[in-house]
Amino acid sequence: MNKHLIMAALCCYSSFSFAGFDVITLGAKGGIQDGNLTAFMLKSNTDNNYITLDAGSIVNGLIAATNKGAFNDMMAPISSPYTQEGYILTQKIQGYFISHAHLDHIAGLIIASPDDSNKPIYALPSVHQTISQDYFNWKAWPNFTSQGEGFKLGKYELAPLTINQWLPIANTELKVKAFPLSHSGAESTAFLFKNAANEVIIYLGDTGPDAVEKSTALDTIWQQIAPYIQQKKLKGIFIETSFSNSTPDKLLFGHLTPRWLLTELDSLAGYVGGEQPLKDLNVIITHIKHSLKKGTNPQTVIEQELQADNKLGVNFIFTEQGDRTLL
């Protein structure tokens, strides 16, 4: 069902006369599957440039997207010195939005940095602090930023975000508003993006349910986005579901299961109000953990568990690395 939706979008992505958002999955998984870790490219359909939502896998994701034809309408010019992947990385990606500094959300950015172009890394100050102290410090990796320890190569500007305040994103038509998330003691982030048509899309980094995290972070976000759903302006929610329902709360470590995601979506529906308030809402499932156990396909289990209790009529979408999706 979800694959049909994605393919339908792919059939018409060459026309950008309508509003909405264009998403390319550079990395679909969480945890241990190096080369396919959480990262998405996002732009408005009326824009020419992208930003990324996290950056667990970058170059490997660009190669997969090229092989699937996702960039057929933005081929590298013949005069360009770059491959197709190099052209997209250096010319089309205008900034990185990092929800938190765990390796599976930033490893691709770090590894690609020597051949990348100058651009900002947008994040909350706590995330920047970890990036600067623990990665770009001339111990783990050369300092490609404009602050921190040692000689500063100055390729990346660490651009801080202020919670609950709109910020224009350089070289795009998008604006962003950041919200904190609770991730088992670490500060994660949700990014709300708005295009020129005042349509929005929200991306949530790793997060546990409010009840387990002893937090109100998700509840605050649900209240913020409910009016956009009422106005039919919310094009989609990117949210993680790392584990199946068999995972006990004490082993979630700041993540969601299908049961907890549906509980949180029930809370969102309460703020939206009306009959079937979330019917057909696009919810893109991210950060499913890869398993090394025989006979185990976590995505199949998680998809079955979400659909079995989907009384809200939500449209759950599971993308694969290299997919291009219109929302």
Image (cartoon, rainbow, N blue to C red):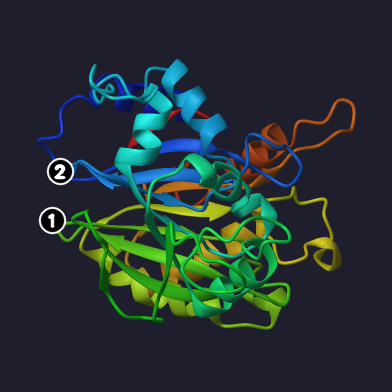
Which amino acid type is shown beneath numbered disc 1? Ala
Numbered label attached to residue 197: 1
Q: As drawn, which residue projects farthest toward the left?
A: 17
Compare residues 17 and 223 and report the one nearer the observer.
17
Q: Between tags 2 and 1, which lies in front?
A: 2
Compare residues 11 and 276 and report the one nearer the observer.
11
Horizontal side of residue 191 vs 285, given as left or right: left
* Res 215 → quadrant: bottom right
Compare residues 118 and 95 and report the one nearer the observer.
118
Residue 269, image x, y percentages: 42, 66
> Do labels 2 and 1 touch, CB within 8 Å?
yes
Residue 128, image x, y percentages: 54, 72
Residue 320 seen in the figure: no
Q: Secondary structure at mark 1?
A: loop
Which amino acid type is shown beneath numbered disc 2? Thr
Tell me how far mark 2 sits from mark 1, CA to CA.
9 Å
Horizontal side of residue 54 vs 85, given as left or right: right
* Res 132 → quadrant: bottom right
* Res 148 → quadrant: bottom right
Residue 177, image x, y percentages: 34, 72
Q: Residue at x 60, y 44 (%)?
A: 111
Q: Which residue is mark 2?
A: 46
Pointer 2: residues within 10 angstroms few (<14), some, or many (20+)? some
Q: Secondary structure at mark 2?
A: loop
Horizontal side of residue 68 vs 150, given as left or right: left
- Which image quadrant: the C terminus? top left
Q: Earlier in the sequence, mark 2 or mark 1?
A: 2
